Structures are given as structure tokens and as C-alpha cells.
Image (cartoon, rainbow, N blue to C red):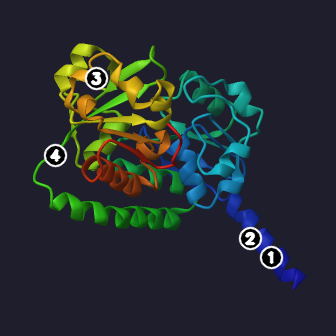
């Protein structure tokens, strides 16, 4: 029995050491020689790693990584757009995964220069982008089959949504606002992850002409004429709930502001485009089309 256990342990060790080659967000082949110590620089990436069953190998995370709850027990290396190589290298990683646009950009080059395998993960706010992201991460950790299982589960989650969408003849116009207190307010449009999720949920993007995110102005909000406003849950909390939202420039002059039609949804749940993409899109659809007033999607928090 002991001999069999020792053999299994040896095989597991060999599996960890087995090199994997993965095509990253730049289309370049990256060789991963060991997945024994992983640092994840993005919340969605961390979520996928745990869903793939390699969470026990993750030794560090960035501040956007908070799901699943076990992630919070890991040391943080800072926020993905305010990183330094020294803090990451202190965790002795064998593999680092993060979005291509981490900041400062030299950090990933410094890690590669130190001999660490670095996989830049694609992050397109579409269903195909979610598939690509899961497959890239799964290939990087040698869990290709498990990655395909996650994709099939995600697509099963979307079946109920597609059935509901087929029954709708008109689409609501939705406006996504990124809020972090009354002084930090942005309107997000084409190319942003929250708007990509809105479109997947059958909600038309009201912020036409805005690429990514732009400073919120009364003129832009009024011109958008949204039927619905979508915000991150923490963002809505930061301005005092729906009443605080109505006080922001232009909001009370919109159909959404007058009716109080707001969907508040957890940041990572809405914008992650990971294994929960189907669930999040369905939740957003329900909030938009099957509820009135304020609807809190994802983890429920007091507002």
C-alpha cells in the first residue's frame, strides 16, 4: 500500500513538472515548466484557476481577486494596474498569469527576465472571449479537459437565457456607470466588460459613441436616454444607493432615473467573463426585464 501511495506521489510530482506550451494573448507560445507555485494578477483569472481545481497551487493574488472566498486567505501583491515585480518575485512563483494590460507593463518583462513563466491572458468581453480565456488558462496549468467541462457548463447556463431572449421583440437601452464615490464617475461603452455582458443579456448599449470608459457628464447621460442603469454593487453603495444615484448629473432626467430602474451587480460577477458568464448574463436579464425598481444581482449586500 505504501509503495502504491509513493508511486502516486511520484506521478503527481512529475505531472507538476511536465512542460506545457500555451499560446498567450499576443499569439506567442509560452512554455510552462512548472505549475507548482502560481501567482494570479487578475480576479477572473484567479476564479478560473480555482474552478479548474488548481487553487491549492495559487500562492499569491492581486487585489481584484476575491472569489472564491478561499482566495482572500492568499497574500496580495497589490492591484493589477499598480504592480511591482519585487513583491511578486518574493512569493517564488513558477508561473504568473495576468491580463496583457497589467501596469506598469515592464513588470511582466521583469518577471520573464527572472526566469518565471508568464502567460498573458486574453480578456475580450464576449462569449467567445470567455471561452478563449478559460482555454488559455486551462492549457497553462495542464487542465485542458477540465477547461472544456467549464465551457460546457457555462453554455448550459446560457440555454435558459437564449430561450427568454427568443421571446422578446424589443430591447431595453442600458447605461453602465462606473462609480467610486460622487467624485469618481464614468460612463462605460463599447469595449468595456460590463457593456459586453449587457449585450450578451439582450440589453442594448445606450452609450453609443463612447469607447471603453469616459468621464460622466450630464449631457452624455441625458443623451443616452437609458431605460435601465447598471452599476457595480460597491459603486452604488459608494454614492448612497438609488437616491444618491439620482443626484448625479443628468440621471434624474432619464427614463431610468425617473423610474428608479437600476441593476446593481457584483464587479467580478458582471465583468469577469469566466465560468459564471452564463449565470451572470441570466441574472442581468432577470433584473432588466422581469423586475422593476432596484434589483441586486449576485452576492446580496445591503444598499
Residue 149 point in image, percent of width and height: 46, 67
Q: Nearer the viewer, mark 2 or mark 4?
A: 4
Residue at left offset 34%, top offset 56%: 282
Q: Which mark is residue 7?
A: 1
Image marks 3 and 2: residues in contact by CB distance under 8 Å? no
Callout 3: SS? helix
Q: Earlier in the sequence, mark 2 or mark 4?
A: 2
Q: In whole angstroms, how far apart are the C-alphas of marks 4 and 3?
A: 20 Å
Decide if residue 104 is in sight here: yes
Where, quadrant-wise, is the N terminus in this rendering?
bottom right
| Farthest-out residue, right | 2
Look at the picture and state if 41 lies above or below 23. above
Q: In whole angstroms, how far apart are the C-alphas of marks 2 and 4?
A: 54 Å
Residue at left offset 62%, top offset 35%: 62
Density class for disc 3 (Cα within 10 Å; few <14, some 14-19, many ≥20) is: many
Callout 2: SS? helix
Image marks 2 and 1: residues in contact by CB distance under 8 Å? yes
- Residue ID for mark 2: 11
Amino acid at each position: 500500500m505504501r509503495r502504491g501511495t509513493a508511486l502516486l506521489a511520484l506521478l503527481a510530482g512529475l505531472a507538476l513538472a511536465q512542460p506545457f506550451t500555451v499560446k498567450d494573448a499576443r499569439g506567442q507560445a509560452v512554455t510552462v515548466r512548472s505549475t507548482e507555485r502560481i501567482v494570479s494578477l487578475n480576479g477572473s483569472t484567479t476564479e478560473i484557476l480555482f474552478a479548474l481545481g488548481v487553487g491549492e497551487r495559487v500562492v499569491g493574488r492581486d487585489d481584484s481577486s476575491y472569489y472564491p472566498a478561499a482566495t482572500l486567505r492568499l497574500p496580495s501583491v497589490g492591484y493589477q494596474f499598480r504592480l511591482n515585480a519585487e513583491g511578486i518575485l518574493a512569493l517564488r512563483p513558477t508561473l504568473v498569469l495576468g491580463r496583457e494590460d497589467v501596469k506598469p507593463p515592464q513588470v511582466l518583462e521583469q518577471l520573464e527576465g527572472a526566469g518565471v513563466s508568464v502567460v498573458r491572458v486574453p480578456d475580450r468581453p464576449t462569449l467567445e472571449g470567455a471561452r478563449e480565456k478559460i482555454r488559455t488558462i486551462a492549457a497553462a496549468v495542464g487542465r485542458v479537459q477540465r477547461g472544456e467541462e467549464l465551457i460546457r457548463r457555462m453554455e448550459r447556463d446560457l440555454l435558459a437565457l437564449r430561450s427568454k431572449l427568443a421571446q422578446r421583440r424589443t430591447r431595453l437601452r442600458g447605461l453602465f456607470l462606473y462609480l467610486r464615490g460622487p467624485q469618481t464617475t464614468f460612463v462605460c461603452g463599447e469595449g468595456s466588460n460590463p457593456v459586453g455582458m449587457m449585450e450578451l443579456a439582450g440589453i442594448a448599449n445606450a452609450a453609443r459613441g463612447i469607447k471603453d470608459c469616459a468621464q460622466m457628464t450630464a449631457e452624455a447621460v441625458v443623451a443616452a436616454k437609458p431605460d435601465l442603469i447598471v452599476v457595480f454593487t460597491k459603486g452604488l453603495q459608494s454614492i448612497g444607493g438609488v437616491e444618491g444615484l439620482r443626484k448625479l448629473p443628468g440621471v434624474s432626467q432619464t427614463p431610468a432615473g425617473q423610474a428608479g430602474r437600476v441593476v446593481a451587480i457584483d464587479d467580478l460577477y458582471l465583468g469577469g467573463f469566466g465560468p459564471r458568464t452564463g449565470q451572470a448574463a441570466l441574472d442581468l436579464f432577470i433584473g432588466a426585464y422581469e423586475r422593476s425598481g432596484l434589483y441586486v444581482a449576485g452576492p446580496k449586500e445591503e444598499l
